Image (cartoon, helix red, strand yellow):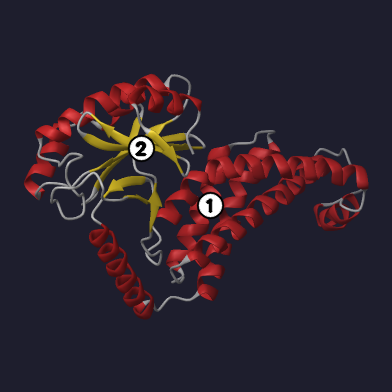
Amino acid sequence: MVGTGLKKLAKELGLKTDQGIAYGEYLGFNVTFSEGMGYKLLGISTKSPDTEQVGAFLASLPDDDSLLKDFRINALNIHDDAVVVNFHDNPGTMNKFRDALNWILPQLKSYGFTGSGYCPLCGSSISPFDPWKLDEVVAHHVHPGCSSAAEMQSANLVEQFISEDTGSYGRGFLGALAGAILGAIPWAVALFFGFFVSMLGFVIGFLAQKGYDLAGGRYGKGKIAIVIITSVFGVILGNVLSDCLILGTMINDGEIAEATLRDIPLMLTAAYSDIEFLKGSFLDLGMGLFFAFLGMIGMIRDLRNSDPTSKRRMKDLQQA
C-alpha cells in the first residue's frame, strides 16, 4: 500500500500508482514505493554489476548506525535484479525517505548498476512497449520472455526443494509449541507488573519459529500458520500464568485466607466461570494479542518473504 506521504511524493515525481504501489522512472532508475505497519520500502529495479563492484558499493556505505540515524534505513538488500531499502517508519521518515532516494540513486549509477533503459533480468536494452511487472515489492520494466523464464526457473527450483525437504509439520508444531511456551514466561512476568510489551510478542514468535526449525519442521506456508497459531497460544498461556502469579502473590501475602498455592487451579476455574472476570480477562487478552502482533508483524513478513516454497509470480502492471 501507499499512504498519503508516498502518494504525494509519487505524484510530484510523476510516478504511477497501481496494485497498492507507486512506480516509474526517477533519476534514471525505475523505482517502487510501498509501505506497511511500521515500515516504508524503496525498491530499485536494476541489473546488479559484478561481485567486485557490488562489494565496492557496499564498502562505500555508511555504517548501520549512520544509515539509521541519517536516513532511517534499517536494511538494504542487493539482489541480482533489484536493490530493496527498508525504512523504519515514524514521524519525519518521509523527509528521510526523500533524502535517501536522492542520495542512493546516483551512488548506484556510479558503481555500475543498470538504469531504467535496461531489463533488470537480462541486462539488455528495453523498449517502451515492453511490459511492467510487479515482482513482490519491486516493479520491473522487463522483456516478456525474461519474466516468463524467471517464473519457470523459480517453479522448477521450488519443486526440487519440496521433493528434497525431509521436514515434518508435526515435529515443527511440537517444536514451535515448546518455543511459544518458553516465550510465555517473560510475557507473564511483564503482565504481572502491569506492562504490555510488544517486543515480548516478538520474543514469543521468535522462539516459536526457532523451536519449529530446531525440531525439523517442514518448509512452506504451513510453517507460517503454525508459528502464528502457537504464538497466539503463547500469549494466552502468558495471560493465564500472569493470573497464577497474581493469585500466588495474594496467597503468600495472606490476602486470601486459608488458601494455599495448590488451590490456584480451582481458584482459576472459578474465576474463569465468572462473567465479570472473563470480561476483564478478554480485554487484557485482546490488548495482549494486539501488542504481540505489533511485535511479530515484521517477523511474519520476513517469514513470508523468505519462504523457499513460494513460486515467483510477476503480476501485470499498467504501463508507467
- Mark 2 is surrounded, within 10 Å at the Cα level, by few (under 14), some (14 to 19) or many (20 or more) other residues, namely many
Q: Quick check: can you spot residue 75?
A: yes
Taking depth in this image into account, of 99 and 216 the one nearest to the observer is 99
Residue 58 left/right relative to 211: left
Q: Quadrant of residue 167?
A: bottom left
Say above or below: 120 vs 190: below
Q: Quadrant of residue 269?
A: bottom right
Say above or below: 37 vs 243: above
Query: Going 79% across and 45% down the picture, which residue do you hit?
Result: 282
Query: Going 86% across and 39% down the picture, which residue do you hit?
Result: 254
Query: Going 23% across and 44% down the picture, which residue do you hit?
Result: 128
Which label is found at residue 205?
1
Which residue corresponds to mark 2?
Answer: 23
Which label is found at residue 192?
none
Residue 8 left/right relative to 114: right
Q: Amino acid at mark 2?
A: Tyr
